[in-house]
Image (cartoon, helix red, strand yellow):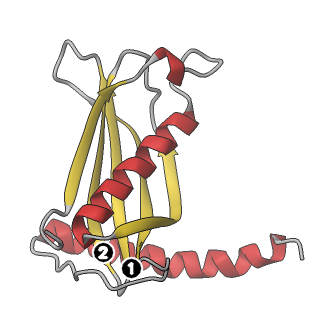
């Protein structure tokens, strides 16, 4: 049901096919997992098909090793009219112990679309806790920063 589930965690083992030339999990594999978790979270919240509009602030804090258990947690931190800002944390560690360390974090913006691919309204998320208010306010500040960065990036777009 839309507007009920605001977070999801995907759990799985990293595989040899995920490895890069340095012997660690490839950043592109991590980005794919982030996109999958963001979609699952946004679709669960909105009850609609969603597309990725933005992924930013990706920070690769620590490497993920092949054979690690990986947890990709996604949480709605702000909703606009048709968009959802999703906070993502990726944690990993040895599956034989319970400790997981932060490996990656970022923000992904998903947009709900209708059958014609047009943006469609999503349920509003209203923060309930002090931490939720902080996350929402952070998302709003980041939105303002993205507008400024977007204007600066126009100079780099080849026309």
Q: Secondary structure at mark 1?
A: helix
Q: Is residue 153 visible?
A: yes
Give residue 143's position: percent from left, percent from top.
47, 78
Q: CA distance from mark 1 to mark 2?
A: 8 Å
Is 103 positioned to the left or the right of 124 in the image?
Answer: right
Q: Quadrant of the N terminus?
A: bottom left
Q: Is residue 32 above or below residue 150?
A: above
The quarter holding residue 86 reads bottom left
> Which residue carries the number 1 mark?
140
**Contact, CB < 8 Å: mark 1 with mark 2?**
yes
Q: Secondary structure at mark 2?
A: strand
Q: Is residue 51 above or below residue 61?
A: below
Is 84 positioned to the left or the right of 4 in the image?
Answer: right
The quarter holding residue 28 reads top right
- Extreme residue in the top direction: 96
Q: Residue at x 30, y 64 (%)?
A: 43
Q: Residue at x 62, y 17 (%)?
A: 22
Circle number at residue 78: 2
How many neighbours does mark 1 have within 10 angstroms: few (below 14), some (14-19), or many (20 or more)? some
- Is residue 73 or residue 153 the one in the foreground? 73
Q: Is residue 105 visible?
A: no
Between disc 1 and disc 2, whose residue precedes?
A: 2
Q: Residue at x 88, y 71 (%)?
A: 158
- In this rendering, the label closer to the viewer, 1 or 2: 2
Give residue 63's position: percent from left, percent from top.
47, 27
Q: Quadrant of the C terminus?
A: bottom right
Give residue 29's position: percent from left, percent from top.
51, 35
């Amino acid at each position: 049901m839309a507007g009920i589930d605001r977070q999801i965690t995907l759990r799985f083992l990293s595989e040899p096919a995920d490895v890069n030339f340095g012997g660690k999990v490839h950043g592109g594999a991590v980005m794919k997992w982030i996109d999958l978790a963001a979609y699952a979270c946004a679709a669960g919240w909105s009850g609609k098909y969603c597309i990725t509009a933005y992924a930013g602030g990706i920070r690769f804090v620590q490497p993920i090793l092949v054979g690690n258990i990986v947890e990709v947690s996604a949480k709605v931190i702000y909703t606009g009219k048709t968009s959802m800002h999703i906070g993502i944390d990726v944690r990993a560690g040895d599956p034989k112990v319970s400790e997981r360390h932060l490996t990656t974090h970022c923000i992904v913006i998903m947009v709900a679309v209708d059958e014609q691919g047009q943006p469609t309204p999503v349920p509003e998320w209203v923060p309930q806790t002090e931490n939720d208010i902080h996350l929402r306010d952070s998302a709003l500040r980041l939105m303002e920063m993205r507008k400024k960065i977007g204007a600066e990036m126009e100079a780099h777009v080849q026309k």
